[in-house]
Amino acid sequence: MTEVVIHGKQLAKPLNRRKRVTVELPEFLIRAIRVRVDEANQNEPDEEEVDFNDVVEWLLVTEVTIRRMPLLEASIPGFTAAMAVWLMDATYQAPDSEE
């Protein structure tokens, strides 16, 4: 079992590298994303605020459904492991330590 976990992490690592891409979008979409950024940051402390890139990333990842995961894994080996790592990094919050 340990070998599978280690292998999965090794496959995920290159797929989780960040790359910059340029995308052309119509102005109405850019403004809609900015509105979503403002909504997400409402009443949030500075260290938890999101930016334009965060919102675009979440919008794109919502297109990846459980049904599509095996298809994507077949085309992109390591996709499932990379997605699992991304989800943990994006959503995991360590419990507060009680003293």
Image (cartoon, rainbow, N blue to C red):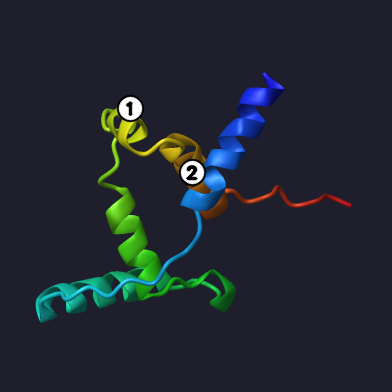
Where on the picture, by quarter, is residue 42?
bottom left
Residue at 19 percent across and 79 percent down: it is 31
User: Three-letter amino acid code at disc 1?
Assistant: Pro
Residue 15, disc: none
Residue at 28 percent across and 57 percent down: it is 59
Q: Secondary structure at mark 2?
A: helix
Question: In screen coordinates, is 2 left or right of 52?
Answer: right
Residue at 50 percent across and 53 percent down: it is 16
Real-space Cα distance between discs 2 and 1? 13 Å
Residue 90: give x, y in percent of width and height. 51, 54
As drawn, 16 above or below 71: below
User: Three-letter amino acid code at disc 2?
Assistant: Ala
Classify mark 2: residues with Cα within 10 Å, few (<14), some (14-19) or many (20+). many
Residue 99: give x, y in percent of width and height. 89, 52
Question: In screen coordinates, is 79 left or right of 14?
Answer: left
Q: Please state the total of marks drawn on the protein image.
A: 2
Residue at 60 percent across and 41 percent down: it is 10
Q: Which residue is mark 1?
A: 70
Residue 82, disc: 2
